[in-house]
Image: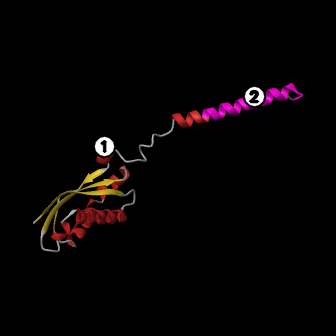
Amino acid sequence: MFANRLVNIMLIVLAALTLIGVLTLVVYTQLFQETGAEEGEPTIDQVLERSVETEEITTNLSSNNIIRSQYVIQLENNDAKKEFEKRSFQVENIIIQELSDMTAADFRGSEGIQGLEDRIKNRINEIMQDGEVVQVYMNQRVIQ
């Protein structure tokens, strides 16, 4: 191939080292690649771990009815959960404000409840700094 035997040996060693390096990189990325479970939908255990249940809240609606409700709020991560627990008084205030603008008729059908859950989620996310609310679930409601 080449006139100098030393150059041939050097090229063969260089090609072998390059091939070993590429194979090592491929094996490393395949074996130590994360499963992707963190990026997809969380498991129910993760949802429960990152959720906070509010105290039962009783307040007046604008239609002079009384509502007693309770919520489960799912948060993005554990840091957000810790911050949320510290901000519980602000969260209760937000919920009371949202409820006081509603009437008993606003709770008929799933659209009214879903709208309230979305408004609560958006207002809480405005005050959160270490994460965000993923979902708000109305756990209980009694209107009198």
Residue at horizontal 22 percent and vertical 67 percent from the top? 96
Q: Position of residue 98 (x, y in %)?
A: 24, 69
Q: Main secondary structure of the magenta part?
A: helix
Residue in view at x 27 percent, y 52 percent: 52
Extent of the magenta region? 2-24
Q: Is residue 20 above or below residue 117?
A: above
Which residue is labeled 1 in the image?
45
Q: Is residue 124 above or below residue 27?
A: below
Q: Pointer 1 and pointer 2: residues touching (CB < 8 Å)?
A: no
| Amino acid found under the numbered disc labelled 1 | Asp
Residue pictured at 34% horizontal, 57% vertical: 133
Side of 38 where 65 appears, left or right:
left
The image quarter in which residue 136 lies: bottom left
Q: Nearer the viewer, residue 71 or 81?
A: 71
Helix, strand or loop under label 1: helix
Mark 2 crowdedness (10 Å alpha carbons): few <14, some 14-19, many ≥20: few
Task: Point out the image quarter for the C terminus.
Answer: bottom left
Q: Which mark is residue 120?
A: none
Please give the count of numbered marks on the rendered protein: 2
Residue 64 drawn at (x, y percent): 12, 73
Q: Secondary structure at mark 2?
A: helix
Please name the residue that numbered disc 2 is placed on.
13
Q: Is residue 8 magenta?
A: yes
Structural distance between the alpha carbons of marks 1 and 2: 52 Å
Could you tell me residue 78's position as x and y percent?
36, 49
Which three-letter amino acid code belongs to the residue tagged 2? Val
